[in-house]
Image: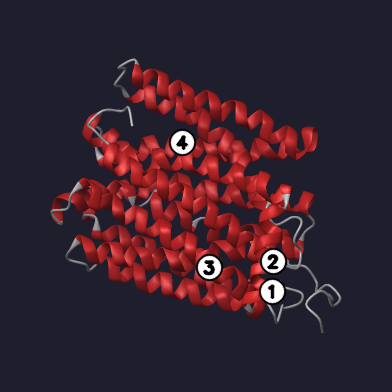
Amino acid sequence: MSATTLPPARPRPADLVIAIALALLLGLQPVSTDLYLPALPGIKAELGASMRATQQTMAALLLAFGFGQLVWGPVADRVGRRPVLLGTLAAYLFASLAAAGVDDIHALVTVRAIQGAAMAGAVVVARAMVRDLYPPHEGMRIMSLGLSGLGLIAITSPLLGGWVTAQFGWRANFVAIGAIVLAALLFVALRLPETIRARNPRALQPGPLLAAWSAILRHPTFLSWAGLTAATYAGLFVFLAGSSFVYMQVLGLSAAQYGLALCSSSVSYLIGTFWCRRWLVAHGPRGTVARAAGLTLAGGLTMAALALAGVQSVWAILVPQLAYAFGHGSHQSCGQAGVVGPFPQQAGAASALSGFLLAAVAFGVGQWLGGALDGTTRP
């Protein structure tokens, strides 16, 4: 059978099963960042690391996450979704347990890179599954439903991270991450069927792969949605990578208080995913992201203005971030489904390229941030 000839569609898994799978798989991103962030000051102190070296634990995760998607996307098109999910989730689990036992910052950076490469497989397959099963307009609704579940994970992650750090130290954070990854692995193994309808035997051949990437990167729909997700996530990443130092070291919050502050942003994001579904019905995808963009822009500009004016207080960071996070709930729901919409036979490759662009932009922002943190809220 050729790569472009599809067999009859398989019975579609229940929408709820797919939504739970999306929440667990895409939820690895906030688990890898939000749950980890309260541990950063403790890691820096115990391992005797510089600020830049400590930030490299986030940068390594992102860099491996970006390049890993370029590998796992075509592999998933070639061998199927389940083998990639089961293998990468198992690798992520072992890397999390290894991270709990490291004794220097360079080893931690290495293990975080392994986590990022493994997370790439889970995330790229999650986006591709939506295109396997749904047309683009319905895929945005299902993606929004899954991201509502992700929002719940994002709410609990900083609270759990702050509590675990305060009670047991930073190493226990990685044990908690491992437990969550184990839950995702068991759900995939027991409940999630294969979703690809026709494997592409040429997906890993260099010529067809490069031709597919070239066509995807020239497609205006892909460029629009990939640009949206990359730019808005980069803004979120500034907050994620810098907030533990700003909230805890500049503004004096405890680890538990910081977890609550981060949680409030996740609550706003969760509400944004619910509101996204209402906007999609009333205004369509373009109208939805246009409205959400007003909120992200207002949040970012307000935070910048207050910092430049010398306002060094919790509310000056917290309130603008709530607006940004609310809009982000629409951008990611629409964008992550939109990037794969035009490519039903190349959903893995399109998902991979979008994820790589997102990670590359966030990595660049993270590299700048590591040298820019100066003991104020301005960076």
Q: Is residue 281 above or below residue 168?
A: above
Q: Residues within 10 Å of mark 3 (few under 14, many from 20)?
A: many
- Give how far across and how far down residue 61 sits, in percent: 39, 59
Mark number, residue 212: 2
- Quadrant of the snapshot with the C terminus: top left
Q: Give the residue displayed 71% in from the left and 71% down from the top.
A: 195
Residue 255 picture location, percent across and down: 26, 41
Q: Quadrant of residue 25?
A: bottom right
Dot 2 and dot 1 residues touching (CB under 8 Å): yes
Asked if residue 21 shows in the view, the reply is no
Q: CA distance from mark 3 to mark 2?
A: 19 Å
> What is the CA distance from the residue labelled 2 to the residue labelled 1?
6 Å
Q: Kindly identify the amino acid type of the residue bearing the numbered disc 2.
A: Ala
Please, what is the three-letter code of the amino acid marked with disc 1? Pro
Question: Is 210 or 249 nearer to us in this picture?
Answer: 210
Q: Which mark is residue 265?
A: 4
Quadrant in which residue 290 is drawn:
top right
Dot label at residue 26: none
Q: Is residue 319 above or below residue 208?
A: above
Q: Nearer the viewer, mark 4 or mark 2?
A: 2
Q: Residue at x 29, y 37 (%)?
A: 372
From mark 4 to mark 1, how far is it between C-alphas? 42 Å
